[in-house]
Image: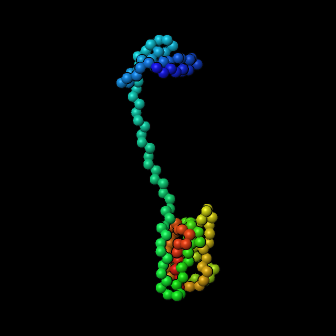
Amino acid sequence: MKEYTFKIDGTEYKVSVEETENGKANVVVNGMAHSIEMEKKQAPPPMPTIKKTSPKPTQPTEQPKVKSDKEYAIKAPLPGIILDVFVKEGDSIKAGQKIILLEAMKMENNIDSDREGIVKQIKVQKGDSVYEGDVLILIS
């Protein structure tokens, strides 16, 4: 038997639930016995499935094989997300030129070219996640 105390409109009621079966219960309220029918509880609707999406880091890949002595890879100095790419394949770039904007640890980091050359291949695009050491751009 379970005992409860309810306060309804300032009046206190002592309730004992003696037996419950098939939606019916025998209860005693302030010393008076009652047989009550309980409304079947409906199951709550299922919670909507929320799919959390976040940029997935690209898997580290093998370093590209250098085809000529002039080809050079500009790599990510730290893991992050590519916010912008400021060059396109075929562009001529100078040493110190800003080529990529990388967000890492909630800070924007400019990735500058450390040598002159022509953009041979861009390995990333806006929104990509990268690991430290991933190749971002190949120049020749």
Front in this rendered view, residue 60 or 94: 60
Compared to residue 106, the image places residue 89 above or below, namely below
* Residue extending farthest left: 22
Compared to residue 86, the image places residue 18 above or below, namely above
Report the side of 30 relative to 104 (left or right): left
Report the side of 25 relative to 111 (left or right): left
Residue 51 pos. (x, y %): 46, 53
Residue at 40 percent of width and 26 percent of height? 39
Residue 127 makes an appearance in the image? no
Residue 27: image quadrant is: top left
* Residue extending farthest bottom: 69
Residue 38 pos. (x, y %): 41, 24
Residue at 50 percent of width and 65 percent of height? 57
Residue 69 makes an appearance in the image? yes
Report the side of 14 relative to 97 (left or right): left
Front in this rendered view, residue 46 or 19: 19
Compared to residue 12, the image places residue 42 above or below, namely below
Residue at 50 percent of width and 62 percent of height? 55
Residue at 58 percent of width and 19 percent of height? 10
